[in-house]
Amino acid sequence: MVMSRFMQKKVLGICLVIALLEGFAGLGIEIYAIRISATYIGASISITGVILAMVLIAIAVGYWYGGRLSQHISTPRQALLKAGHVLSLSAISHAIACIMQLPLLAFMTANTSSPILAAMGVGLLFGVGLAFGSTAIPLITQFLSLKHKSDSVNSNSGANLGVDTGKNAGMMVAITTVGSVLGSTLTPILLLPYIGLMSSLALFIVTLAISSYLCTKLAVQLYPDDYVSALTPRQNHMLAVSAVIITAAFIMLSRVDTGYQTATGAWFIKQIIYEDKLAVTITDKPGQSTSSCWIYLTKKNCHWYGEITVAAIEQLEPKSLVFLGGAGMGTPSEVAHANPEMALTVIDIDKDLPSIIETHFLKASIAPNIEFIGDDARGYLTRHRDASYDFMLIDAFQGRFVASNLYTLEALTQFKTNSNYIMANIIGMPTPKHGYTQTIFKNWYEVFGDSAYVLTKNDSTNLQNIMLCNFACPGSQPLAHADFFNQQQKVHTDDIPRLDRYLYRSIESL
């Protein structure tokens, strides 16, 4: 059977669409996996890097295995059906991975203190589906090559119809890469914020199922009389449909709160009763920490470190204030309502945070004397070195852990030029052996010297909020006099990002 050139272009176009959809769904699901994993193991550079490394390994394995499978395929129909089969396996593998992901993360975080191992587990879990998906690319390339050979043999003119193998492979890899780029960019920017986590997951699984359907349908339409195949179209369709059904069941039965999604995070809102008053909390790591707590009736925050900050502000009576990290804006909102003449600036990397805060947290408009800047705090102040504030609070977290780029020697030295009075809220353990906490203490002391003060909530060495000040803030003591301060601890610089581990661990041996 000799195809017209129009038909050849149509077939090639369908193959490229399949490759585009496979790349889009594969990387989109990985963004989904990273986002939902963040509620258990965080989203630091190291964790994201490990998951992406596992993704790339899975894709490489899929390409390699697809090439091996192609060697044993002798007909175009068989190549397409095999590609449809692995795409359906990719869909159902991802669907099963979504069901297993949260129990796996809960188990791993309960049995290991290393988020890197948990990240590897997530990468392996979703890597199976990715490997199946990338296996389809060499198989479709083989189909195009076999079709080209068959058309050339059947052509009366003997002219070469179609394109050569090298061009086939180049186009397929290029298009699936474009799909991967779309999946990795559109998912966090558009899909997660606007249609949500679960709807995005459903879209990706359906996309893989459609890819499988297109492969199988194309094989049946082009070669209806060729029944020499180990895989039947019915099997492919049943697997693809099963993947969609499993995903739909997971979404309907899942009781996991996925939060209010933004391009850079997910925020979880919970109503509570605090001292017989209705209050609300906001966090990006449910079950482990709360970023802000707000009492509706009194318009005050209900966190110990917030109360200390407000007391320090009342002591200093600043005119202009800057908060590095917004979260629920509990503390700045309390200050703003009580002091309408003060000018407050809140800098947070999550640009979409204000709409969530006004709608779901404060349930009111942000105070008019608060200016919100959606930007990386250090980056913004680096670009505005001349910006001057009477008071600064560093309150930027990733879950329970500080944003480490704000605590390097270079960063603190820069902030010292932006404000005379600086406080910082950290979570740590006031013990000389806890390297993570001691590194922050050491940097604070190196920059502020005898003006460095510390305040702990209690005398225990348990994990707790700790306030650092470069002045004698209420209830504090000089850091140099604290018996839990190890002055021999190494410092944290831009060249040695020791804090970017998202895990409390000792680094004394490094």
Image (tube, rainbow, N blue to C red):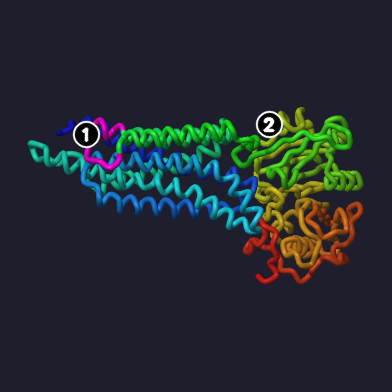
Residue at 79% x, 48% y: name it: 392
Q: 47 or 72, which is in the foreground?
A: 72
Residue at 70% x, 59% y: name it: 504
Q: Secondary structure at mark 2?
A: helix
Tell me where residue 112 appears, x and y as whole percent: 64, 58
Kindly identify which residue carries mark 1: 223
Residue at 75% x, 62% y: name it: 443
Residue 171 sits in which quadrant?
A: top left
Residue 159 visible in the current orientation: yes
Q: Which amino acid, mark 1?
A: Tyr
Tell me where residue 241 appears, x and y as whole percent: 42, 32
| 5 displayed left or right of 399 | left
The magenta segment? 217-231
Dot 1 and dot 2 residues touching (CB under 8 Å): no
Disc number placed over residue 355 in the picture, else none: 2
Q: 291 or 367, which is in the foreground?
A: 291
Disc 1 residue crowd, few under 14, some 14–19, many 20+, Cα 10 Å: some
Residue 119 sits above or below residue 276 on the image: below
Identify the image quadrant of the C terminus. Answer: bottom right
